Image: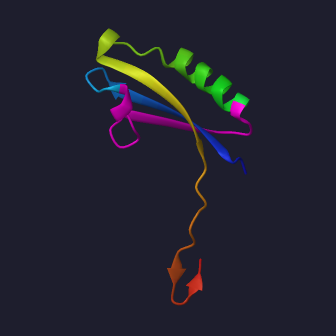
Amino acid sequence: MSELLSVALVCAGTLLAQDCSRETALDVIVSPARTPMECMMHAQTVAAAAGLPGGDQRYLKITCERRHAEVPVLTAGRAS
């Protein structure tokens, strides 16, 4: 499984870039990446393909994140 995620955040043009996050984004596009270089290259492809209509009303912010380990759900005393 890939350790990195390429994350594209579609944010409102009125939102400051430092405030654009998964929680505040209008849309989030996530895809796996094997290396930091692949992450950034994939992010550029997503940005080009997004073609965000609306001019200054929306913008795309790209980040590369480490995948969080999945936490097992405990049910009746055992992990599932």
Q: Position of residue 45 (x, y in %)?
A: 61, 20
Residue beneath the point at 74% across and 36% down: 35
Corner quadrant of residue 69: bottom right
- Kindly give the residue lying farthest to the left in the view shown: 14
> Is residue 10 highlighted in magenta?
no
Total labels: the figure holds: 0
Relative to 9, is 68 above or below?
Answer: below
Relative to 71, is 21 above or below?
Answer: above
Residue beneath the point at 53% across and 74% down: 73
Side (left or right) of 42 relative to 77? right
Residue beneath the point at 61% across and 41% down: 5
Side (left or right) of 67 relative to 61? right
Task: Find the magenta span and give its range.
Answer: 17-36
Which of the pair 12/53 is nearer the observer? 12
Side (left or right) of 60 relative to 42? left
Report whether residue 42 is seen. yes
Residue beneath the point at 31% across and 12% down: 56
> Is residue 25 highlighted in magenta?
yes
Q: Looking at the rendering, in which quadrant would you find the C terminus?
A: bottom right
- Kindly give the residue lying farthest to the front in the view shown: 18
- Kindly give the residue lying farthest to the top in the view shown: 55
Corner quadrant of residue 58: top left
Report whether residue 26 is seen. no
Q: Position of residue 15 (x, y in %)?
A: 28, 27
Relative to 70, is 18 above or below?
Answer: above
Q: Position of residue 25 (x, y in %)?
A: 36, 35
Q: How is the image coloured?
A: rainbow
